[in-house]
Amino acid sequence: MAFESIEDIRARTEELRQRVAAARIAEGKPPEPPENFVPIPLGIILAEELAPFYKIAVQYAAVIAAGSLVRVDTSRLEKYRETAKLASMSVGVNVGLIGSSVKRALHTMDKINEAIEEGREDEIDTRREMRMLNHFVRNINRSPWKDGINHKSEEPPYVQEAAIKAEVERLKNDPEAYQALLDAAWRRYREIEHLI
């Protein structure tokens, strides 16, 4: 088996980046999506708010794995959909993956609901959907606390983690500061939502 050279991989990556940029431009968006902006402490709190969705996604995946397609009232899950929008814009990789995976799991539920409502259940590839849900569930179960560690920093990880924990606790204990940070993040999200 022949392996690609690093140069070949870089060339393919650049080609894909250009194709994505062209697709974004065709949609009337800038070539690059907006930078993530949700600070790590707020992201961790958002991820904690999304944590109960993990059990929902696992139970749903188990039903799909058993070969059943069931309709889910996703209107009852809107709070997770909204929180996931903001969490997916976290500067922390794990929180971003948690938010994006909640969004994708809900999208899968919506897609299956639509197929059931339209009588197109036979068009759903349950094995594919199960694999995708498994991927999303694994990401939803990531630890948001790992986002607080900068491995290139001179500070030991335990010092960095303590600082993040202190800020998260401060926000949890100061509802006004938390709400101000959350409101600012939502304002920023609404400003750039059409560019994502």
Image: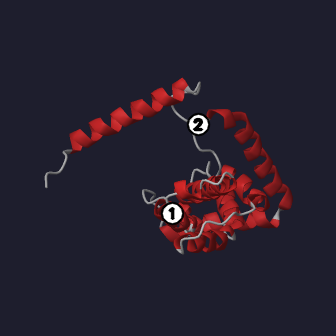
Q: Spatial distance from mark 1 to mark 2, Cα to Cα? A: 34 Å
Q: Residue furthest right?
A: 176
Q: Amino acid at mark 1?
A: Thr
Q: Horizontal and vertical percent for residue 99?
A: 62, 56
Report the front residue among 13 and 128. Answer: 128
For the N terminus, the quadrant is: bottom left
113 is higher (above) or lower (below) than 7: below
Which label was assigned to residue 34? 2
Height in image: 133 above or below 13? Answer: below
Local packing at callout 2 (Cα closer than 10 Å; few below 14, some 14-19, many 20+) is some
Instruction: Find disc 1 in the rendering and name its residue.
Output: 126
Dividing the picture into quarters, in which one does residue 154 lie?
A: bottom left
Q: Is residue 46 visible in this depiction of the protein?
A: yes
**Residue in the picture at 30% in, 38% down:** 12
Determine the secondary structure under disc 2: loop
Tell me residue 152's x, y (percent): 42, 56
Q: Is residue 126 left or right of residue 184?
A: left
Tell me the kind of residue under disc 2. Pro
Visible residue check, residue 149: no
**Relative to 133, is 183 on the left or the right?**
right
Which quarter of the image is occupied by the C terminus? top right
Q: Residue furthest left?
A: 1
